[in-house]
Amino acid sequence: MGAYSIKDLEQLSGIKAHTIRMWEQRYGVVEPRRTETNIRFYDDTQLKHLLNIALLSKHGYKISKISKLSPSEFTSAIEQLYEQTLLHETNVELDLDANDLMVSMIDMDEDKFHRIYENSVKNNGFEKTITGLVYPFLEKVGILWTIGQINPAQEHFMSCLIRQKIIAGIDRLPTSKDGKKFLLFLPEGEHHEIGLLMANYLLKKKGARVYFMGQNLPSKDIKMCIETVKPAAVLTFFVDPAVTNNAQHVIEGFKVEGADCDYLIATRPSPDLEEMKDPRVHLLHGIKELDNFI
């Protein structure tokens, strides 16, 4: 069971903490639990309920009306929104956002994930779905990891579904034999490859010849790949704190002396990395920066 502070709820739902407090006091729509030492917290059920309230509020329901709905009426209103949004028989199109993927993760509801994803692809296309829906969702998952309030099974469940969708998108693209060579990998200790898969898609779509080596690759194997493939650039992601906190050492470990290639490192801003003087090392802090580099 999760144990969230009101600040956690604000970050995860997008609803300001003072608004949540007002809704608690005035309408009783979500009630905090208390620890044995009388500290307020919220559990998974309350987080899910608040995410659904945010969905109804976003689509025109006033909180005064939501608070008067019985449990069955509340569930029916949520289901009706999903039906209006996701079924092809209707012309009503409503945007679904990362909060709705959060609910599907909490419930481990694969059918809901597929419906949300496919609806977004239909309305916005594959790339905008990844950047506008999946990435914001993953940022929320990152918040859950930071505060230690995520079930690894739930995260793995969603990551596998997202991974399947991106791989399917990659497979639909033609393979280039003459394009600029890019070598993609995650160094030893890195296992989250969704960003790397999306980079694979973007590069392949632009006609690059991509060599995708996957996750957790030892430095000696990376060097061997660089020497064999002779890429124009290598691209990797540093996400795990054990890697990012030792980033300069990791980079020096797989760089090949004399190799005529650029090293693209997608990572969070870091003063330590910004001090690197090697002109071949380029730090990327977002998917748009990668797109600009390509």
Image (cartoon, rainbow, N blue to C red):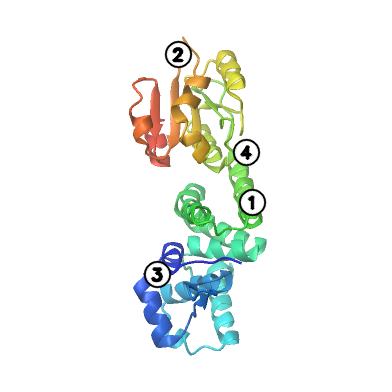
Say left or right for 272 vs 86: left
Labelled disc at residue 171 = 4
Q: Position of residue 190 (x, y in %)?
A: 57, 36
Give the foreground label among 4 and 1. Answer: 1
- Find numbered disc 1 in the image and state the secondary structure of the residue it sits on: helix
Q: Position of residue 80 (x, y in %)?
A: 56, 78
* Quarter of the figure with the C terminus: top left
Q: Which residue is mark 2?
A: 260
Q: Nearer the viewer, residue 3 or 187?
A: 3
- Find numbered disc 3 in the image and state the secondary structure of the residue it sits on: loop
Q: Which residue is mark 1?
A: 156
* Quarter of the figure with the N terminus: bottom right
Q: Amino acid at mark 3?
A: Ile
For the residues labelled 4 and 1, the Cα–Cα distance comes to 22 Å
Which of the two labelled residues, at mark 4 and mark 3, occupies the earlier sequence position? 3
Residue 165 to residue 49: above or below: above
Q: Which residue is mark 3?
A: 15
